[in-house]
Amino acid sequence: MLSAIAIVPSAPVLVPELAGAAAGELSDLTAAVGAAAAGLPDRWIAVGVGPADDVVNPESAGSFAGFGVDVRVRLAPQSRAEVEMPLSALIAAWVRGQVRPDASVQVRVYAHSHEPTAARTRGRQLRVEIDEQPDPIGVLVVADGVNTLTPAAPGGYDPSGADAQQLLDDALAAGDAGALVRLPPRVLGRVAFGVLAGLTDPGPRSAKELYRGAPYGVGYFTGVWQP
């Protein structure tokens, strides 16, 4: 059964070794991520986006070496199989290690190319699968917003991106699942947010915002939904 949903950004700068001197500037974000994930049980399914649909199982381990520092992470306490993990899986593994080291995580990666309605359908299918399990399962949604929010943003600066980011932030803060299916393509994690919409269709019982901001020109949101 589905117990709770935590929403966090797919941000390598969450990892202090990668953030370097900027780690102190991100203390509000990292604290919010910890608070969101702390409410999950000891079994998680993480939802993220990638080039193709994929599943990364709990026996897997990986490293942030591709992002500049060999910080090793695992999806479960006894994970040993080193694999190339997508960023969403690396973030999920890092959050697990920081917040619930006793937990195990399976990562569901959904292709960027899915249309929002198809993503919502996959979310509904995932909800059926979760509800068939007798034990509580938490979901960790790992996804970013718009990456064009400041002149130094990785996607370049586009002032119109602020409207799309506010639409996303407001929908997540209010638990507006319907709005998540209407996100524009510029929202990097819109497929993951579409899965979230289907997972909680027609919407969560409650939603709580813990953080919203764009410290490096990328929209980050952290919060908790109760299904």
Image: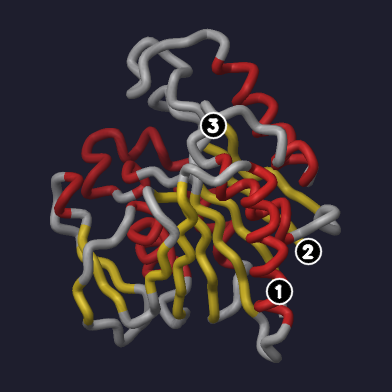
Determine crowd level at label 2: few under 14, some 14-19, many 20+ residues with C-alpha closer than 10 A.
some
Q: Residue 18 appears in which quarter of the rendering?
A: top left
Task: List the single residue furthest toward the bottom.
Answer: 134
Q: In front: mark 2 or mark 3?
A: 3
17 relative to 158 in the view: left or right: left
Does label 2 or label 3 sit earlier along the sequence?
Answer: 3
Q: Quadrant of the C terminus?
A: bottom right
Q: Which residue is mark 3?
A: 187
Separation (CA) of disc 2 from disc 3: 23 Å
103 relative to 21 in the view: left or right: right
Separation (CA) of disc 1 from disc 3: 26 Å
Does label 2 or label 1 sit earlier along the sequence?
Answer: 1
Please report contact status of discs 2 and 1: CB closer than 8 Å, yes or no.
yes
Query: Mark 1: which amino acid?
Result: Leu
Query: Mark 3: which amino acid?
Result: Val
The colour mode here is secondary structure
Q: Which residue is mark 2?
A: 227
Q: What number is the disc on residue 2? A: 1
Q: Residue at x 71, y 40 (%)?
A: 181
Image position, residue 136 (x, y; %): 67, 82
Q: What number is the disc on residue 216? A: none
- Looking at the picture, tell me which residue is in the foreground, 188 or 102: 188
Separation (CA) of disc 2 from disc 1: 7 Å
Image position, residue 46 (x, y; %): 51, 64
Q: Residue at x 27, y 40 (%)?
A: 19
SS at mark 2 in the image: loop
